[in-house]
Amino acid sequence: MLNAIFVFDMDGTLLSRRTVDVLCTLFNLNERLKLIDKVSLTLPAYRIEEMIAKLFKGKNVNDMLSAFDSIPLNDGVEEFISKVRAHGCATAIATDSYTFLAKKLASRLKIDFVYGLDVKIRDNIFSGKILSEYKCLEISLCRRYYVCKLWFIRELKKKHVCPIVSIGDGESDYCMSTGADYPIAVNAKSEKLKEVCKLNVKSFKDLLKFDINTFISR
């Protein structure tokens, strides 16, 4: 039986940069991304996800993977995951970035579960089409993402019947934080995320100072 599952956001939490920023720099799409960012707060998040996916239509997946691999981890990530694993806990990535990228990082970090945004890929070319089913539970203050991290946490709880610790930094992590047994914000960029979390720290180096049992005591 697992002692707990630690669910990590990817961009900005495990990784030091947003994947979309790195990919747009690679493909010279920064100006088009800025236009999308300008309207991002006026539309549901799933519409923004559709617009961003279309930016990468026709791009080679190997190029995307190479750029993704160049993004540094945040300091302390690998040490913290090792500490979590040593305490008999599983790990998961929940991200509104693309599943095929998240799986690459999961393999590198030996993450147990991955939930992300599925897209159509044909002959190693990114189609720009999202395949994920819209699962958003549409709780209060949610911006309505394709990837519902709260739904994912509830599914993990059903299957594994253990405490869930969520670790995130941004707006898309708010919903999963409301459903976690111990929500943590790392270098939070969202005030509403800070308000719902039991612990707010600046970095994984700070998290390493805590006994894991602090987060998983039943």
Image: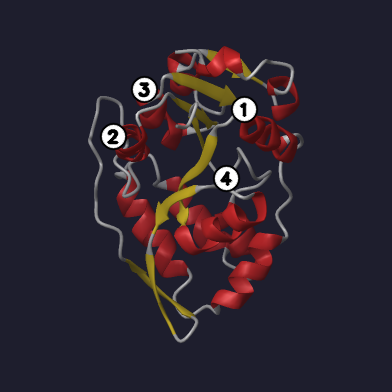
Q: Which residue is drawn at 61% across and 26% down?
A: 186
Cα–Cα span, label 4 and label 3: 19 Å
* Residue neighbourhood size for the residue with mark 3, other residues' Cα within 10 Å, grouped as few (<14), some (14–19), many (≥20): some
Nearest to the eye among marks 2 and 1: give it: 1
Mark 2 or mark 3: whose residue is earlier in sequence: 2
Q: Name the residue under label 1.
A: 87
Q: Residue flagged by tag 3: what amino acid is it?
A: Thr
117 horizontally vs 208: left or right: left
* 66 w.r.t. 173: above or below: below
Q: How many marks?
A: 4
Q: Name the residue under label 2.
A: 158
Q: What element carries label 2?
A: helix
Nearest to the eye among marks 1 and 3: give it: 1
Mark 4 or mark 3: whose residue is earlier in sequence: 4
Residue 209 point in image, percent of width and height? 74, 17
Q: Do the residues labelled 1 and 4 touch (CB within 8 Å)?
A: no
Q: Name the residue under label 4.
A: 11
Q: Which residue is drawn at 56% across and 44% down?
A: 10
Nearest to the eye among marks 4 and 2: give it: 2
Q: What element carries label 3?
A: helix
Cα–Cα span, label 2 and label 1: 21 Å
Q: Residue flagged by tag 2: what amino acid is it?
A: Lys
Comparing 63 with 34, the one in front is 63
* Residue neighbourhood size for the residue with mark 4, other residues' Cα within 10 Å, grouped as few (<14), some (14–19), many (≥20): many
Q: Residue flagged by tag 1: what amino acid is it?
A: His
